[in-house]
Image (cartoon, helix red, strand yellow):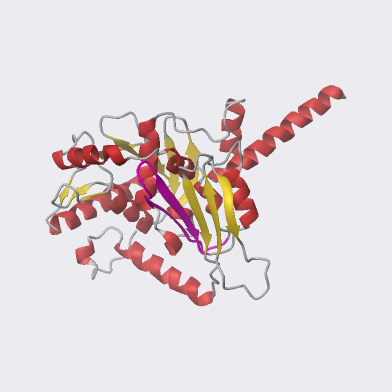
Amino acid sequence: MAADLLVDTRCRTLSTAVRQRIAYTGERYKGAHQEVQAHPGKPLIPAADTWEQALLETEFLHRGGELGSASQHPMGIVRIRPYPDRLTVVLDNEPYVIRYWVDRLLPVDSGPADEIRGICGLRYSRTGHHVRLYRQDTATAIDLTGFNPHWWDRAVDAAVVDARAQDATPCFTGATAPWTTAERDLHTALADTICDPHLGSRLLRRIRLTAFEGPYGGTDLWSHPAGRQRYDWILETLRGHDHSKLLALLTDPQTGVGLQLRRRSCYCEQAGMEDEGCTAVLESPDGVQRLLVRDLRWTVDEADLQCRTKYVTDRNRHAFSPWTEREDTRAVR
């Protein structure tokens, strides 16, 4: 009887840990179960094990965190699978989401040294059903999957046409393309102002905790300088979270993002305050890292859903066409 009870307790503890991990990553139960079971005693959500990997993930988040209500998934991300040395990101299987990420991530030289769009040094390669992103000359990796990888190629082709139409130069042509001089100069110039990237990395590895139930989501996440060696992050959602649960997940001492709740203004339980947004401020113990959580609490009606459906249909129709040819109405297949 004692042995049976011990086994049952272990199973329930494992199941609880798996469900907790899923709350952050959105993984399927089987995959999360395998990872938790294979690494007993290890952190439930592994951290990036190098500065460069954390920095790439933070830049990924910074560049792509404004998809908002255009996708029902936060930033178009359906699931995350975190490893110490890499990150697997399952994207929404929609052409416009793939084009969004191509436009936001891949570096394009617009002229002056301080006008590189995208992530300096970022390159990509196709590996089976994955598109692997990495910064040239570093041991970094973000694997994108969940979609037809040929869509990525088509989106890249359209992005190259757009760049050249604007007299800009794509820096990413070829998986082994070296850093351009402009990329290297800008990356070097910014080196002294790069803040600790681990908060951004931790947020990305837990991005699914901001997910909504239902067809209409909306998560924006961006950062801005707040003094030397510090960035403030802002997480903005449109509606519907259980704020106590969200804040508990963010501030959990074992699985959260390393921040503590400092201030909270929540009007969800107050009559007559239905139109007021709710906010919370989270900070690291030393006050260096800060996250502002803001829920706008917008209401969504049938007209909003129809508008979003029309927007997605239109974006998908043109996802693989250069923006200069948007009058072309051929459907994406």
Identity of the residue drawn at 41% across and 43% down? 145
Residue under the image location 77 percent in, 31 percent down: 9
Q: With 294 as the anchor, is 244 left or right in this view?
A: right
Relative to 184, does residue 214 appear above or below in the rendering? below
| Residue 12, quarter of the rendered image | top right
Q: Is residue 57 magenta?
A: no
The residue nearer to you, when weighing 312 against 207, is 207
Q: Nearer the viewer, residue 10 or 250?
A: 250
Residue 80, compared with residue 303, is above or below; it is: above
> What quarter of the picture does the N terminus occupy?
top right
With respect to residue 202, does 241 lie above or below?
below
- Residue range highlighted in magenta: 214-238
- Is residue 237 covered in magenta? yes
Q: Quadrant of the C terminus?
A: bottom left
In the image, residue 77 lies at what x, y percent? 46, 50
Q: 281 and 223: which one is in front?
A: 281
Residue that lies at the very extreme toward the right in this rendered image:
1
Residue 46, horizontal then vertical, whole percent: 51, 33
Q: Residue at x 14, y 53 (%)?
A: 168
**Can you give x and y, in whole percent of width and height, for residue 100 in the image?**
33, 55
Q: From the viewer's perspective, tell me whether residue 30 is left or right of residue 226.
A: right
Q: Is residue 181 above or below residue 327?
A: above
Regarding residue 66, the answer to whether it shows in the image is yes
